[in-house]
Image (cartoon, rainbow, N blue to C red):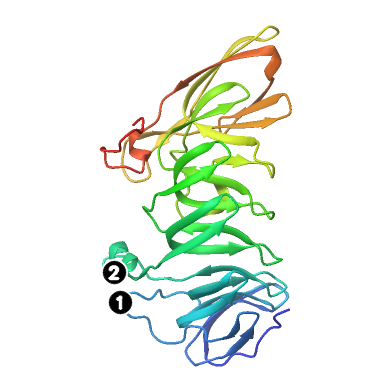
Amino acid sequence: MNEAPVLNGITSCTLYANGNVCECRVNEENVLQTSAGALVPRYSRPGVREKELKSLSFYANGSLRSIYLEAQTEIPTPIGPFPAELVTFYEDGAIDSVFPLNGQIGFAWSEEEEGELAQVYEFPLAFGRITVKLNGLRFYPDGKLKSLIFWPGAVVPLHTPGGDFSGRIGVRLHDNGNLESFEPAVPVVLNTPIGPVPAFDVNALAVDADFNSIRFDRKGKLVQLKTSGDIVVQSAGAGRKIISSRTRMGLMDDTVAKLPLALSFAGNMVTIDDGVERFTYDIADCKFLILPDFDRSGFNCTGDCNGCSC
């Protein structure tokens, strides 16, 4: 376990109720011994691309949670060394995540400039080889690779249990190495227990690969997807029900955004979640009609995407 270090030059900090440091900034050099080696947290004043953030954060028991590094440092990981500007840890000290870059995107430093510093890596995985400009990676507590976070805008060909598709944002793996989830770059049609369903999450979180919308179990069986539009359910006992995507105002403009419907499959049942209510049906007792309606603004394309249905 990483025990609470003695720190020099603390300029600001927040505390837990037990009095231990939650997070802090420092303005003097400190060398911390971690499972990733000797690391120096950020102490210099930020430049054009550096973030003015906490240098360190800790768990309530005092063990190290995250470290914003003074300079990019090569970190030994279970799958090889990677450069890092930000590293996070599990409570027992094992590496949780590694981020090669941690620049401040804004008026003084653009995402394009940051992207020029990002490196392309190749990962030979159980479901195929992925070559991608990397934003970050996460690990399970035992050191196995958990997820790859792609650089914003990167689109990668993926071989999945549901077919070959283009993916964005990232992928998550089961601890046996099989694909657990991915985020399609454009709407894709998946064969499901209720028939073909166009799958795409217009509201996908673009900075985290742990919550992708298309999910498979450890053996490759589809267990979840997201779609948008209307689903008409006809059942002998309950009659006809229309489940529709809810809407909200867009985060970046005044347009109305259509939120996704989440479909989960377990045994002979399907659950449809519109974000407020959940509806569960016995698949054998129902007929389903899928009427997709995706907001073009959510697509990761520029309008000339060959073969996508935008």
- Amino acid type of the residue tagged 2 in the rendering: Trp
Number of numbered discs visible in the structure rendering: 2
The answer to whether one can see residue 56 in this image is no
Q: Is residue 112 left or right of residue 9?
A: left
- The percent coordinates of residue 120 (x first, y second) are 40, 64
Dot 1 falls on a residue whose secondary structure is: loop
- Amino acid type of the residue tagged 1 in the rendering: Val
Q: Residue at x 70, y 72 (%)?
A: 60
Q: Quadrant of residue 116?
A: bottom left
Tell me the quarter of the image containing the N terminus.
bottom right
Q: Read off the residue under disc 1.
A: 48
In the rendered structure, which disc, 1 or 2, sits on the residue that comes first in sequence?
A: 1
Vertical side of 144 occupied by 248: above or below: above
Mark 1 neighbour density, 10 Å: few (under 14) some (14–19) many (20 or more):
few
Dot 2 falls on a residue whose secondary structure is: loop
Residue 189: which disc? Answer: none
Q: Is residue 65 left or right of residue 204?
A: right
Q: Residue at x 33, y 65 (%)?
A: 115
Q: Residue at x 65, y 40 (%)?
A: 220
Q: Is residue 22 left or right of residue 128?
A: right
Q: Quadrant of residue 141?
A: bottom right
Tell me the quarter of the image containing the C terminus.
top left
| CB-based contact (under 8 Å), mark 1 and mark 2 | yes
The answer to whether one can see residue 107 in this image is yes
Q: Is residue 2 left or right of residue 294?
A: right
- The percent coordinates of residue 4 (x first, y second) are 68, 83
Mark 2 neighbour density, 10 Å: few (under 14) some (14–19) many (20 or more):
some
Vertical side of 1 occupied by 153: above or below: above
As measured in the structure, the alpha-carbon distance from the residue carrying label 1 to the one carrying label 2 is 7 Å
- The percent coordinates of residue 134 (x first, y second) are 44, 62
Q: Read off the residue under disc 2.
A: 109
